[in-house]
Image (cartoon, rainbow, N blue to C red):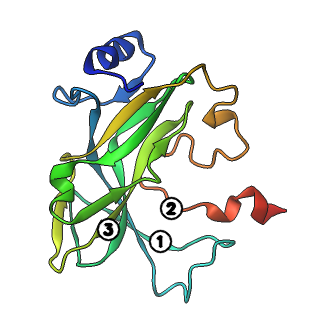
């Protein structure tokens, strides 16, 4: 079941869903808009010859109010909002359709687990032949919350695989910490 604007407001008022800062116009009929932060990561092509899933990836860090993404380029960005999801809900992260229509693909592995907290790291890809300029503070994605049939028995923070709990700013891949790599 997708939560409506009324239920989202109720759960936020109760403190069950925590989003800070929450913009006045953030709550939509069945989602909550989030804004672009000012922290970005770009793969450091000069520090690596190839991306290996069992080794840390090297990124260049950028902090800026404006970022121009070149054509067919990939950037990690963060949301301005810090989010805490209760254990009886989960959420999908979707790019806003108005942003998608510019040719900017926004992804975040698409899902926020029960118990997740932190800023979201968004994976941005400019599919256009022209650069796209982004500004911190602009609405860029939306969260769609779903009610679970019962609270999760093991929330995101309690899991051994909770690599991103409490993250702030754009956070690079930690796939090298996957349990099957460690074995």
Q: Which mark is residue 125?
A: 3
Q: Nearer the viewer, mark 1 or mark 3?
A: 3
Q: Which mark is residue 111?
A: none
Q: Is residue 92 left or right of residue 136?
A: right
Q: Residue at x 32, y 57 (%)?
A: 106
Occupied quadrant, residue 87 = top right
- Per the image, the residue denoted by label 1 is 59
Badge 1 or badge 3: first in the primary sequence: 1
- Work out which quarter of the rendered image holds the N terminus and state it: top left
- Give me the residue at 63% from left, 78% from top: 52
Q: In this image, 153 relative to 149: left or right?
A: right
Q: CA distance from mark 2 to mark 1?
A: 7 Å
The residue where tag 2 is placed is 172
| Res. 168 visible in picture | no
**Residue located 50% across and 45% down the image:** 167
**Front residue of this view, candidates 22 and 153:** 153
The kind of secondary structure element at disc 3 is strand
């Amino acid at each position: 079941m997708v939560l409506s604007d009324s239920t989202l407001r109720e759960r936020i008022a109760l403190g069950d869903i925590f989003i800070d800062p929450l913009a006045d116009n953030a709550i939509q009929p069945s989602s909550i808009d989030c804004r672009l932060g000012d922290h970005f990561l770009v793969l450091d092509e000069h520090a690596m010859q190839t991306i290996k899933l069992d080794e840390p990836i090297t990124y260049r860090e950028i902090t800026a109010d404006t970022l121009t993404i070149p054509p067919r380029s990939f950037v990690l960005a963060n949301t301005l909002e810090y989010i805490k999801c209760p254990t009886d809900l989960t959420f999908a992260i979707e790019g806003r359709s108005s942003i998608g229509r510019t040719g900017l693909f926004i992804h975040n592995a698409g899902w926020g687990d029960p118990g997740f907290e932190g800023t979201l790291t968004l994976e941005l890809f400019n599919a256009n032949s022209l650069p796209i300029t982004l500004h911190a503070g602009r609405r860029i994605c939306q969260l769609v919350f779903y009610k679970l049939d019962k609270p999760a028995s093991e929330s995101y923070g309690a899991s051994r695989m909770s690599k991103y709990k409490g993250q702030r700013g754009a956070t690079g891949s930690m796939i090298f910490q996957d349990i099957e790599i460690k074995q």
